Every structure is written in structure tokens, then in C-alpha cells.
Amino acid sequence: MCISCDWAPYFEAFGRKQTLSRRSVLRGGAAFTAAAALAPTLFGANASADEAAAASDGPADFIFRNGPIYTVTGSAASAVAVRGKHIVHVGDEAGAMAMAGPKTEIIDLDGRLLMPGFVEGHTHPFLGAFLTSGVDLQLANLAEVLAAIEDYAKAHPTGPIRGFGWRVDMFPPEGPTRADLDRILPDRPAFFFAIDGHSLWANSKALEMAGVSHDTPDPIPGFSYYARDQKGDPTGYVLEVNAVLGLVNAVEPITAETMAKLLATWLPKAAAAGITTVFDAGVPPVGSDQGALIQRYIDAEKQGILPFRVSCSYSVKSLPIDKTVATMTDLNKRMASELVHVDVVKIVGDGSQGGYTAWLLEPYADMPNSTGGSPFTEDQWHELIGMVDAAGYDVHVHACGDRTARVALDAIEKAIATNPPRDRRNAIAHLVYVEDVDNARFAKLNVTAQFSANWSSADPDTLGNMVARYGQPRASKMYRTKTILNEGGRVSFGTDWPAAGYFSTYEPLKSIEVGVTRQLIGQPDAPVLSPADERVTVEEAIHANTMGAAYQLRMEDKIGSIEVGKLADLIVLDRNILAIDPHDIHKAKVELGMMNGIVRHKA
């Protein structure tokens, strides 16, 4: 869950310092040389002033017609026209066709749905590309997992073996053991990330390479540690980032160049999923350079292969915090291009429920001597958020635990009272469980509640481990998205790929389906996660993944809806997800994706 900033120390260990360009601009695409100007009289009587003014700029590059158009704003439209990077007509078909020229591409929707591109409010492209590049362990049981590892090892006969996706519910509370791996991989190092990204399963050879033994001290006792048996020997279950990264670093270090190559393989998949903007919730540094991987986004932009714009964040996950503003300011000024910018300070407020590291107000039901933890004291929370707010930056807080959410809200409220008025766009992410009194504060403080809707299904992990961790009544009040909306709060969606509770996805359509049904994907007879009335409508889910996230990222005036003057970030779905059974939303395919008026995906 929200693991990129946890991974920062891992990347600090690798790579040489690089000399990188500071600014580049995407060039190319669907360029069009304007023909003779169209007169304003070609527009209908109801045409907007913007549309009339646009007529002098020549014909449209694209016209979409003959299908449902969901603008998100509530306005009706039967056609949309695009010129250059912008939308220049939203309205009747006659008005759109009046903008047609000899080279205009007229796209017949033929009943397909046109809607805004998805704005992912919280995801991790670099880490997703890296962590999911080994063997996929999102399987039904331990036997299938071990078989998949064995098959993968046979197909890849040399080097370390790694993978991603095993679930906590496959093992007893003590977690996985190296013995299972040693039986099939006795001589090669192997490690496998849990689906929440907060823990690791390693074999004896990997532990040996990392120097982890009976006498090895835990990096952060009780928080980041090596699980041990009754004799004190490591079992192969490694929890939280410091311990995890120490082992991975020893077995299979990576470089920024490797990360760039992995990212490049994922970019077309993102475009095919309809993603046109992302918030990278914590881009790790390489060596001492906080901007090394951000530069890789800019490089991809310069090469013309970046299919989305990126709002990046600088992560703070531990002390010291005194250089936060200075570092953020440097990145904000140094790493900027047309599509890539750094605007937000990400604060890793706690861990996850799976490893008992989410920070709770009341003890865990199945571990009554623990309430989890945070890297910061409450005073440090206030100091950190206060200084970031005073500098004019927004914060984005990882808060799986209810105490983390409360302390973050307290610190934001104090910063509002202390610092001069301004337009604040703070967000708190994950929000697995939040106390009733705190839900109402999101609207009061204008804090976006950022949910990974794909976590909110009544899946085996949630019904087993999560219920055990929380106990009743807390376990029946998780992921209360509708409550935030009903109380006037703002909501955004983002998959948090690759981190997950039960299944990992970067596809917004799958996340939207779960947010609407609170069930496992495509299973109308599956249990509904309680409370069932926290299900959102399809319209609300789309808004969260478009305008809701765009507002969070300060881009609502440019993207997130289909309006004249906005950037042409548009997708065409093969079916109207507003008119079908919500359990079939995941079946919808993006047949065309456009960002900045450039077609980035075509099925």
C-alpha cells in the first residue's frame, strides 16, 4: 500500500550521479496546418464565444460523432471537435461538422462511449514496472504459488528469482517461511514481494547473501524486522521497507537505466487502459539525486513515448525533516516540462494493516498490545505539515490507519489557522478505516479523500485478515467513500498500482467497478463489503477518476471533463459503462486514447 516512498532508500543505494537536461518539450503528433479560416457565421445560434473565436484557427483535426458522450459536467453533447491540443466544440453535430476540413479525421463512435481520459490520483509507474516484472503470484493458494515459482525458475535457469503478488491470507499469522522455497530453490537466491508491497518472502540463499542470521539486528525493532522462529533464526518473512530493502539490495541491485527500460514497456499498457494523467505518489531518488527518475519521465516525453502527463511528488518517510521545503523547491524548479512537474510533498504516515504497522487509535483486535506506528511524533507531524503549507505546497499523506488520518487532519487544520489564506489542495490517501468524527473534517478542511477503490471488495483477504486485525465494529466500516461524498467532501480514485489488498491492477475501469459494487470483479453473487451503502454510483466513480483527481492535482481547469478550451484528453470505450450491468464494467475496452490531441492508443 503506497510503497514508493518506502522504496526510496533502495534506489539511493544504486546508480551513479547523472548529468541530466532540466527541461524538454514533447514535439510531434497529429500536427495540422490550418486551411482558410472558417467564418463565425458557420456556428449555430447557441455557439459559445470560445467556439466562435476558434473558427479563425482553421478546421478541426478530429470530430467525434454518432455515439454517447459523457462530459462529466452534466452538459449534453452529440459531437466533439478537437483542434491541436484543445477541445474546440462540445455540442450539436451540425456545429462540429461545420469545423470539418479536407484533412479532418471524423471518428464515427457507432454507439461507443466518448469520455474524458482517466486521471489516476495515486499510482506508482516506476515501482509497478519493476515489482511486477518477475513471476506473478496473484494466485488462489500456496500450492499454485509454489508451482508457479518452480515453473518460472525452470524457464529462467540462471540468476536470482523474484516475483510479486502473494497474499497474506495464504499463510498463518506468522507469515511465510523459507523452508517452502528451499525445497524448490535450494541453490539460487529468491525473494517475492507481497501484494501490499510491505513485506517479502525470501529463501535461505537470499538471507545468506544479505547476511541475515540469528545474530543480525532488526533495522527497526517491532516495525521493520526479520520474523524469527522460537530459536531466534530468521524464518524468511521480512517486514517493512528497511529490512526488505537491505535484502533486495544485497541480492539484485538495479539501476536507473533498468528502471527506464521497464517503464517504457509499461507506457503502452497505461495508454491502453485509458490513463492520460497520473499522480506518481513518491518518485524514489537514485543516489543523492532526488530527480533522477523524474528525469526519466522527461526523457520519455522528449522521445514522444510518454502517453500521459505526470504530477510527481517528493517523499518524506522519516527524520530528518528540516530540509523538506528546500528539497521540494529545488525539484519544483529543476524538474519541469510541458508534461512533467513536481508539486506535492508526499508524507508516509504509517505502514499497513497486514504487518500491524498501520497507526491505529485503538489496538489491533488480534494483537491487543499494539496500535502500530508512525515515523513521526505528533509534534513532528505538525512541524512538517506546517512548514510545507507555509511554503505554498500541498501534502499527500499515506494513511492506512485511523490515527494517521486524524493526526494528518489535525496538522492540516493547524496549518490553515496559522499560515496565510491560500488555495489548498491537500489529500489523504487509502483511508482503510476512519472514525466517524473525522470523516466530516475532509469537507470542512477541503482535503481530498483519496481512495484506491479496487481495495474495497469483500475478498478473502479482507474478510479474513482485515476483519481479524480490526474486529467489530471497525471491520464493518472500512472504505467509507460514500460517507465522505454525502458530507460534502471531495473524493479521488487511484489504483495505487502495484500495491493492493487482494488483486493488483493499474486499470481504472477495474477499480471503478469495485468502487461501484464493493465485490470481487465480475462476480455479481460474491459478498458485498460492509457497509453496502458505501457503494458509489458509476457517475460518482467516473468523477473520482477524472474531475476529482484533476482537482486534487490542480488541473481541473485543464483536464477531467469534456469542455471547450480544455486539453483534448479523451478515450473511446467499446461500450457505455453508464448503461450496462456494473459487474461488466471491467470488460470494457479502450479502443482509442488521446492525450493533448494526439492519439496515443488505437485498438
Image (cartoon, rainbow, N blue to C red):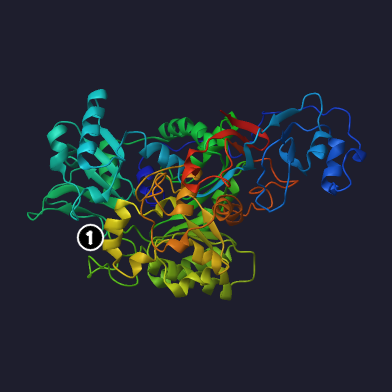
Image x and y of residue 297, in percent? 53, 38
Residue located 42% across and 44% down the image:
522
Q: Can residue 255 be spotted in the picture?
A: yes
**23, above or below 416, in the image:** above
Give the secondary structure at mark 1. loop
Q: Can residue 157 be spotted in the picture?
A: no
Image x and y of residue 256, in percent? 43, 35
- Can you tell which quarter of the image residue 573 is in? top right
**312, above or below 61, in the image:** below
Neighbour class for label 1 at 10 Å: few (<14), some, many (≥20)?
Answer: few
- 471 left or right of 87 in image: left
Q: How many marks?
A: 1
Residue located 34% across and 62% down the image:
358
Image x and y of residue 364, in percent? 27, 67
Question: Looking at the figure, which quarter contains the C terminus?
Answer: top right
**314, above or below 410, in the image:** above
Tell which of 272 and 18 is nearer to you.
272
Tell which of 194 and 161 is nearer to you.
194
- 216 left or right of 68 in image: left
Image x and y of residue 283, in percent? 46, 46
| Residue at numbered disc 1 | 221
- Can you tell which quarter of the image residue 518 is in? bottom left
Circle 1: residue type: Pro
Tell which of 333 and 443 is nearer to you.
443
Residue located 66% across and 41% down the image:
68
